[in-house]
Image: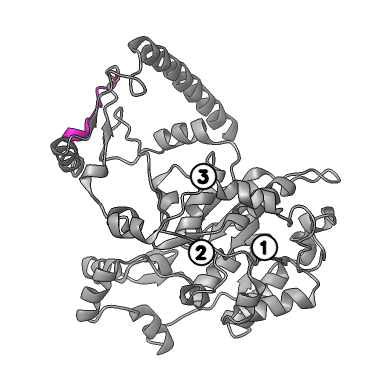
Amino acid sequence: MIQIDEACQLPECTLLSLLRSFPNANYGLIGDIKQLPPFCEEKLKGKLKDYGVGNTMERAIEKKMFPEAIFRYVYRCHPKITELLSELFYDGNLISGVQEDQRNEFMRKRPDFWPNPHYPIILVDNQDPAYKIGTSCGNVTEKILVEQIVEDLLKERDGYQLKKSDIGVISFYSGQTAILSEAFSDTDGVKCDAFRGSERKINPFYSDQTESLSDASSDTDDDVADSFRDTGVKCGTVDAFQGSEKEVIILCCTNERISEFMQLSNRLNVAMSRAKQATIIIGNSIGLCEAKYWKDIVKKVEENGCVADTTKFPFYVSTEQKEDEKDKIVFETDEDEEDDDIETDFEIDFENLFIFETPEPEMPSGQQKWLSEAKYWKDIVKKVEENGGLVDTTKYPFHVAPSDVSSKFENLKIDENSNKTSRRTRKRGKR
């Protein structure tokens, strides 16, 4: 028996490979076809279509080609969110598995922030336009609003306070996601998995030379994350948030015009189902009222008196704030787009790739590996060297004194020994 969880994220080509490898096995697939499918490049989609692969699972379920069991109970969301999702996307078949008082502590304790403690969605009407970032877009006012809202959400009231890790910021646009990630640059988004669906102009990548590069080691990711983590506010696209949950979600529409991809049922379903307690939507009310699904959400919000008062903090942004933020932005012109295809299209070019060599003392384990010896990496290193991208680490700011490396290494060994001791202690406690 092979059991596959989150089967909606399983590429069909992978499923076909499994079926071929284990033809006599029984398969159990658990997933939601009404959420986002696995990421697939456009070129690959065309090739798979030529072989008759694409939406196979959805068609098989619709035609009832194999036995199925429907899980109707939802235990994550506030009952009102579950009710809304059920009406919009599930033909009224969902049932909330939790009571309202299990999912409204934040709203009850923060009447200064939340207008109606019995309804978990509010709309912050942002009429200011977006600006272009390559093939994506960003919004100055929205960024300021998100920063102010997060600041206010973290205030303590009546002994209740949200943690920074309780808050998630979702944007439909990768350009705005990059801007918000910079605003909350000390989040835990340094791991590779967290970057799915995201992009940045400059992206630092860390390899662990003390471990085999063929093995996935979370230790280095965690160490690097600890160096940058402070707020714990996760920012990402809808795709990156699939499978995640937060107590409060801030959902950024960014563009005054609601694009077609924002009206896709599976994408909006994922976006609206990430919050356990409350969702704050920042968007243009006029554009939202003209868009599929969104108009029903806005109608419900208005009926429950949950349109935010944009004349008061944290939902008010002054002209001075907007101007100050605009001064920090380099707006792209038509000439920029014509002269710099790489920047707007984000194509891979090894001339824009650099490697900073960081030699360290040999590890006692003798497991030290190098990029030039590792599969795939050796090809990348070769291309970088051919294009003069190997950085001179004998000069500032890329130089680290050997004494600094040695002292850091000694601290790491001390930390490692203490961690091993604490792990042994925890294991004894469990027994």
Badge 1 element = strand
Answer whether labels 1 and 3 touch (C-beta < 8 Å): no
Image x and y of residue 99, in percent: 76, 66
Disc 1 marks which amino acid? Thr
Residue lying furthest bottom in this view?
63
Mark earlier in primary sequence (1, 3): 3
Residue lying furthest top in this view?
403
The foreground one among 128 and 425 is 128
| Magenta stretch, overall SS | loop
Asked which quadrant contains residue 395, the reply is top left
Left-right relation of 44 to 126: left
Badge 2 element = loop
Question: Which residue sits at x=40%, y=53%?
Answer: 199
The foreground one among 62 and 271 is 271
Residue segment shown in magenta: 363-374
Query: What residue does disc 2 label?
Result: 172
Q: How is the image coloured?
A: one colour
Disc 3 marks which amino acid? Glu
Image x and y of residue 50, in percent: 20, 80
Query: What residue does disc 3 label?
Result: 182
Query: What residue does disc 1 label?
Result: 279
The alpha-carbon separation of the residues under discs 2 and 1 comes to 15 Å
Disc 2 marks which amino acid? Phe
Q: Is residue 245 visible?
A: yes
Asked which quadrant contains residue 10, the reply is bottom left
Check the picture and name the quadrant holding the C terminus. top right
Q: Which mark is residue 24?
A: none
Question: Which residue sits at x=50%, y=54%?
Answer: 177
The alpha-carbon separation of the residues under discs 1 and 3 comes to 22 Å
